[in-house]
Structure formats: C-alpha cells, structure tokens
C-alpha cells in the first residue's frame, strides 16, 4: 500500500511541477496514477488525493468515483450531522470511475462562498471549516492527454479547491477555523 504523507513532509509545502503534455502517457505517469488510486482506495473517508500527498511533486489530482453515488452522499450527510461515523460505503450502485486531473487550473470560482466542513488525508485526524466558493470550473488533461473543462458545485467544487491548494503547497488547516481533532471510530 502506498503511504500517504503527513503535514510535516516538505513536499506538501512545495508548488508542484506541471507534467509535460508529452509525458502524460508514459509509464512513469501511469505508475504515479496507479499509486495515487491505490492510496486513495485504502482510505474509507478519502474523496480525492493529490500527487504530492504520496511524494510526487506533480500537478495531478484524482477524485474518487464513489462521491457520485447516492450511498456516499447519504453517509457524508449523516457524518456531518453527527448521526454516525465513517464506515464502508455499502452500495449496490455501480461506482463511477475516478476522475483524473493533470495540470489542473481553476478557471472560474463563484463569488458565493460558504464555510464547509473539511479534513485531509495528510492532516490526520484534524477537521475544521474552510471558506470555499460554491462553484468552480477546472481546465485539465485526463489520463490520455485529452484536455477538458469540468464545472461543478457543492462537494466537487470544494474538492477542486482543496486539491488545487495541495498543488500550490497549501494545506486546509492553514486557512480553516474551528479546528478539532476527531479520532476514527
């Protein structure tokens, strides 16, 4: 299993390097993506991961396909409202494939912002509230080197902002409020 680095690691505070477009289909980048997906899959509560979190200073992040399932969203709402802890997502839905973002750039953020609960796989087990735009648009390349634009709102917009922060050497607790530690149940 790929180790997820914690907040003390220097690579998490560096601005990650862009991946040359010609390198996207290389075995090196494919291996990095496999490692990221494996690390993300190993964490029940993980919704996304950036390459620096596993030691690669590259502008790549992966969003877990499970966030698009009804069961996941219900589990998340229950957890936020304090009804239950983190558990396995038992779903009979087909889980969509993970989304890959290489060299992502946020091209648009809504002016509407709100304080939202947030945590991080590299800042265990600290949680707090961050001030995030409700909507975000990202331009990036997929795992095949094809450029795309993806708009989002809610959780996915929050993920875009959180993961882009990682690529810029920023951790959520740098700008969060109401921080508290919550050990896993």
Image (cartoon, helix red, strand yellow):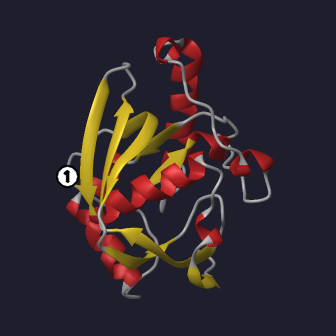
Identify the residue under disc 1: 93
For residue 8, above or below residue 28: below
Query: Where is residue 105 drawn, in percent x and y?
Result: 42, 41
Horizontal side of residue 13 vs 133, given as left or right: right
Residue at (33, 72) in percent of width and height: 75
Query: Where is residue 46 drawn, in percent x and y?
Result: 48, 57
Quarter of the picture containing the N terminus is top right
Q: Is residue 96 visible?
A: no
Residue at (34, 44) in percent of width and height: 138
Q: Front-most of 131 and 74?
A: 131
Q: Residue furthest front?
A: 111
Horizontal side of residue 175 vs 7, given as left or right: left
Q: Front-most of 161 and 112?
A: 112
Q: Front-most of 177 and 65?
A: 177
Residue at (69, 45) in percent of width and height: 3
Residue at (59, 73) in percent of width and height: 175
Quarter of the picture containing the C terminus is bottom right
Element type where label 1 sits in the image: loop
Horizontal side of residue 184 vs 131, given as left or right: right
Q: Front-most of 28 and 136?
A: 136
Q: Is residue 63 visible?
A: yes
Query: Where is residue 160 drawn, in percent x and y?
Result: 41, 53
For residue 79, above or below residue 167: below
For residue 35, above or below residue 9: above
Query: Where is residue 169 drawn, in percent x and y?
Result: 65, 51
């Amino acid at each position: 299993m790929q180790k997820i680095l914690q907040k003390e690691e220097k690579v998490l505070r560096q601005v990650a390097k862009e991946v040359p477009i010609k390198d996207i289909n290389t075995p090196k980048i494919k291996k990095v993506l496999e490692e990221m997906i494996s690390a993300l899959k190993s964490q029940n509560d993980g919704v996304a991961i950036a390459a620096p979190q596993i030691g690669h200073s590259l502008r790549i992040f992966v969003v877990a396909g499970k966030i698009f399932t009804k069961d996941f969203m219900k589990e998340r709402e229950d957890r936020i409202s304090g009804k239950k802890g983190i558990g396995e997502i038992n779903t009979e839905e087909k889980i969509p494939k993970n989304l890959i973002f290489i060299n992502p750039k946020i091209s648009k953020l809504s002016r509407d912002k709100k304080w939202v609960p947030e945590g991080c796989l590299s800042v265990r087990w600290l949680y707090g509230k961050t001030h995030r735009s409700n909507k975000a648009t990202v331009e990036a390349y997929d795992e095949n080197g094809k450029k795309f634009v993806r708009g989002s709102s809610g959780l996915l917009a929050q993920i875009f902002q959180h993961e882009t922060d990682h690529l810029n050497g920023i951790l959520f607790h740098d700008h969060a409020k109401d921080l508290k530690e919550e050990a896993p149940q």
